[in-house]
Amino acid sequence: MNSALIIFLLTYAGVAIGGIPGLAIDRTGIALLGAIAMVAFGGVGEQQALISIDLPTILLLFSLMVISSQLALGGFYTKVAELLAQSLQRPRRFLFQMMIVVAGLSAVLTNDVVCLALAPLLAVAVRRAKLNPVPYLLGLAAAANIGSAATIIGNPQNILIGQSGHLNFGKFLAWCSVPSIVSLAAAFALLLGFYRGKLQLADGAPPTPVAEPGPTYNAHQSRKGIFATVVVMALFFTPIPREVTALCAAGWLLCSRRMTTRSLLGEVDWHLITLFCGLFIVIKGFETTGAPARLVQALAAHGFALNNPLSLTGVSVALSNIVSNVPATMLLTKFLDPAHSLPWYVLALTSTFAGNLITIGSIANLIVIEQAKVQGVHIGFREHARTGIPITLASLGATVVWLWIAG
C-alpha cells in the first residue's frame, strides 16, 4: 500500500479516536504529525505541502478570531450573559431567548468562540438560580451548531466551504437560513419536551459553582468589536475578497492604545488553525495516490454519488460523526464541483447539523462539555445523544424538505 495512503488512514483514524493510546496527543497533534509524516516520507514535497494550505481560508479564519478576541476581551460576552440572566426566573423564556441569541451570535462570530465564551458564564448563572444546568448547556451547544449553519462564517467548516466553493455570501445566507431557523425551533421544542418538569433542580442545594467571571464589560472596546463585525458583514455582500475584508478589520483592531497585541492574539485558537494546516497537507498527500477518484467511483457504483444531495447528506452525516465535521468537510470538499452551488450548501448544512448527533460530532459540543465539567456539571455521551439524535434528525428532515421546496 502507498505510504501516503497509509499516513492518511492512520491520521484520520487518530482524529476519529481523538488521541494515541499511551501518548498525551490530541487531534491537532495527530494532524500535525500526519503532515510531518507526509513530507518526511515523500507523500508530498515541501513546496507542494506549502501550496496545499488554503491561505485565504486560514487568513479569514484567523481574522475572524481576532475580531472575536476584541469582543471577548471587551467584556461583550459578559454583558450578553448578564442580559440573558434577567430572564432566569422564567426558565422557558430564558431557554428560548438564550438559544436565539446564541444562534445569532454563532452565525457571525463562529460557534466555537461563542461556546467558549458563554458556556462558563451561563453555567454559573443557571446554577446560582437553582436551575438544572444540563438542558440549558445542551441548548447552548445545539443552538450554536444550528445557528452557525446559516452563514459562510458561522463555523470553520463553512468558512472552508465558502472559500473552496467560491460561494456568494448573500445567496448562501438566503438558502441556508430557512432550514436553520426551522431546525432551531425544532431543537427548542424537543428540549422542552425531553426536560418537561426538569428545567429546575430537584430537591437539594446545587454544588457551589466554580465562578470564572469573564472580562469586565468595557463599552468602548465592545463597541469597537461590534463596529468591526458590522462593517465586515456588510462588505461580505460585496465582490471584495472576504479574507481581505476580515484581515483589514483585524489589522485595525490591532492598532489599539489599550488592547495589547499579545492579549488579542492570545485569544486566537492557534490549535484549530494548526489542525487545518495539518489536514490540508495530509489530504493533499491522499490526493496524490489517486484514491479519491477511485473512492468517488466506488460510492457512485453503490448508489452514493456525491453530486446527489441525498447521497451527500448520508455520507456527510456518517463521516462527520466518525472523524468530526471539520476533518470530514475538508475531505468531502475535494469531491465537489465549484460550478454547482447546491451540493456545497447541502454539505454546509448537513455537516454542521450532524455535529449535534453525538458529542464528538463538533468541536462546539466538546467545548461546552469541557466548560461544564469545570463548573461541576457532567454531561455524558448518553445524556447528549438523548436529545442530540432527535435534534439532528429534525434538522436533517428540515433540510430534505427545503431541498424539495427550493431545489
Image (cartoon, grey):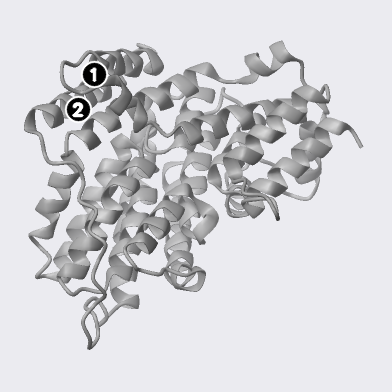
Query: What is the three-letter code of the residue carrying label 1?
Result: Leu
Residue lying at 64% horizontally and 19% vertically, measured from the top left: 52
Which residue is labeled 2 in the image? 225
Q: Is residue 229 above or below residue 178?
A: above
Q: Is residue 351 above or below residue 245?
A: below
Residue pushed farthest right?
1
**Image position, residue 8 (x, y; %):** 75, 37
Q: Is residue 210 above or below residue 342?
A: below
Which residue is labeled 1 in the image? 253
Q: Are marks 2 and 1 in contact (CB under 8 Å)?
A: yes
At numbered mark 2, what does the secondary structure look like: helix, strand or loop? helix
Rendered image quadrant of residue 339:
top right
Q: Is residue 363 left or right of residue 292?
A: left
Residue pushed farthest bottom?
203
| Label 2 vs 1, first from the N-terminus | 2
| Towards the viewer: 39 or 226 | 39
